Amino acid sequence: TVHWHGVNQTGTWQNDGVPDVTQKAIQPGDVFTFHFKVDRPGTFWYHS
């Protein structure tokens, strides 16, 4: 999973958080595409 700082996850809260809490962990070799709308310009920090 990816945790976003400063990017509002309105309507897509399940894409923001801790593995096995808000979504299943992305396993090595698997693919997951995040879809969300950015509501303001800027540079934001994220981590997995």
Image: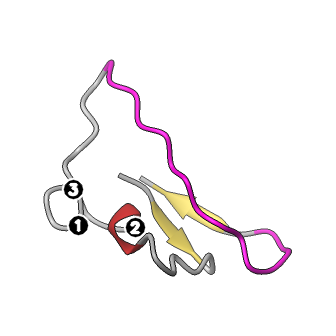
Q: How far apart are the alpha carbons under marks 3 and 2?
A: 9 Å
Image height of 40 relative to 48, above or below? below
Q: Which residues are magenta?
A: 29-43
Residue 19's image quarter?
bottom left
- Residue at the spot of label 1: 22
> Percent from the top left, x then y, of residue 27?
24, 31
Q: Residue at x 62, y 81 (%)?
A: 6
> Percent from the top left, x then y, of residue 44?
70, 69
Residue furthest out toward the front: 11
Q: Residue at x 40, y 67 (%)?
A: 16
Labels 2 & 1 near each other (Cβ < 8 A): yes
Please give the label number shown on residue 19: 3
> Percent from the top left, x then y, of residue 7?
62, 75
- Residue at the spot of label 2: 16
Report the mark closest to the observer, 3 or 1: 1
Residue 20's image quarter?
bottom left
Number of marks: 3
